[in-house]
Image (cartoon, helix red, strand yellow):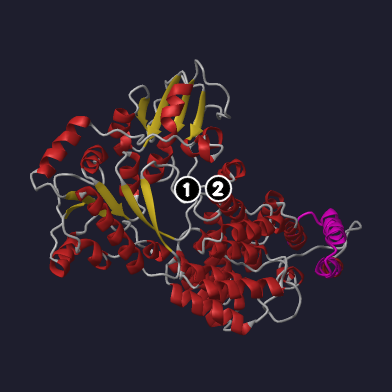
Amino acid sequence: MKKNGRNNPCDCGSGKKFKQCCMLREPDTTGVTVQAVAGIPGKNAIAELLASAIAVHQSGNLKEAQDRYEAILQAVPEQPDALHYLGVIAYQNKQYALAEQLMCHSVRINPSNAFYFSNLGMVYRDQKKLIDAIRCQRSAIALKPDYPEALLNLGAALIDHGKFKEGAENCRKALALRPAYVEAYDNLGTALKLQNNYPAAILAYQQAQALNPSYVAAYSNLAAVLILSRDMGGAIKNCLKAAELDPTHANAYYYLGLACQEQENIAGSVQFFRHAAALAPDNNNVQFALSLSMLASGNLEHGWMGYEFRWFKEVAPVARRSFPYPWWQGESLEDKTILIWGEQGVGDQIMFANLYAEMVRRAGQCIFACTKKLIPLFRHSFPAAQIVDVENVPSDLDIHVQSPAGSMARWLRPDNVSFPQESHFLVADPERVAYWRSRLAVSGPELTIGICWRSGDLSGERSSYCSKIGQWGPIFAIPGVRFVNLQYDECSAELAQVRDQFGVEVQVFPEVDLYDDLAETAALTKAVDLVIGAPTAAIILAAALGVETWEMMSGFTWQTFGTTKNCWYADMHLFRKSWEQEWELVVAQIAAALQAKLARTGD
């Protein structure tokens, strides 16, 4: 997400850096009246001093410029331009609190200066104070409607705030005023990408490149959307061009690393992420991506350490809960109570529950906080622990330490051999399992297969990670099996398609809420012989229960930890589709494996 970067070429065409050009416009001294009395310089003298300070500022000599602005303020303490440009220097030095203070002061003195408001908005945005940033940019535009920089900066703040459509509209308004506004095209591309409109985003980035073939960000940003579009060749080409234009451009190497991940070149991704991290050590997205590649390569020690960057990513950070207890750092828990809280989605909470039985053995008392709909299942699975709602943890519990579920892996899973080989770590209600087995037995002795073919969220690139039910023909054509629906959202049209296209009736039990009633879903899942499907909570639940599970994978996964299997589950088998393949190839492999399984069963 781009703004008028301080070190970028100014879009006015002067050839200067932005910080030495439009960021330092001629001051507006209208209405400032200073009499030359008692040794205080008059208006003309102040204007000359200010002009000399700005000239020094534009030359890049921030210290000398600061001294001159301060000298002006010694003579005229309320001179708004000197205050504002001192704020600009503080902003350039990333002293955001000071910049905010100085710029706010200048705005109070001269509230009719659109330039002041726009710069203050940039300071707010860099501090993630997005509501204030949006307010300031709108104030600037109200004062000066034909202000393309403010429209660009408003668009950027809106995009950061998740208002992608409105952000795109303001980028287009900036382009209407300045048709060759490269950064506006670049930001428009980002807004369109975040709306999952990849073709339009690609065109916007390409327009930025056409207007300025040396504009580095347009190449790396285009690479990002090409990765999402599964054009790895195009992504790599654009990353290499960005690196050629600017060898210090960290994002070029970051996106090369992501392209390597998607192509299952983990060693290459580690190399590129490390280079990006060396160039931008404060970039938490890079650090987190590196941690996942380290985990995927089997370097669990460094991978788990870097996994803590999940809280601080700029893109989709994981929500970090706040409880008033010290963090567990792997120390002895004998005679102590630990609160372990689930994080991320239901699937992640189930996956990290692989660690819970060991924590029960280690600690004096365990309190597991999870999503409400997991509580009954977790109570069956961990009867020695106390299970509470993660959204409503009682405040009167006697707790010594806390840990997010994913952070425990650093202490409990330091290497591959530390993963237990138990067949399961979740337990469904045995009575309900027996009930569902009896229900299924009524239909005959065939192999019973639960199916879940896609995620409930197919937005953006997520659709490429899931098959379509119409591609399952070879699986449905195998005799001697029956299918049970485990797809947890509305799918009646797809089930009708299976019936009409393949002549197969997938068994549905509408009395089971597959989305919210996870205890009953677990019992039904445990009653089937095999589960086949996409990497969703349904598949993760099946594997955690010890049901034989065949997962249809596409792209990068870190849970293999340098092996060929998902180490969290004893009986999960991966059928992987590379980025350039079609799902039909994976379906054919599953159909062949299913036929072989039936042949073994019949022997």
Q: Would residue 179 be seen by someone viewing this image from the given angle?
A: yes
10 Å crowding of disc 1: few (<14), some (14-19), many (20+): some
Residue at (35% x, 46% y) in the render: 540
Q: Amino acid at mark 2?
A: Leu
Q: Element type at marker 2?
A: helix
Task: Decide which of 196, 257 is in the foreground and name it.
Answer: 257
Q: Which residue is mark 2?
A: 295
Q: Are marks 2 and 1 in contact (CB under 8 Å)?
A: yes
Q: Which residues are magenta?
A: 52-80
Using residue 581 as the reference point, say whether residue 437 is left or right of it.
left
Q: For numbered disc 1, what is the local secondary structure? A: loop
Q: Can you give x and y, in whole percent of width and height, for residue 101 in the image?
A: 68, 51
Q: Position of residue 196 (x, y in %)?
A: 42, 68
- Closer to us: 325 or 120: 325
The three-letter code of the residue at mark 1 reads: Gln
Which residue is the extreme one toward the top? 335
Left or right of 506, for residue 49:
right
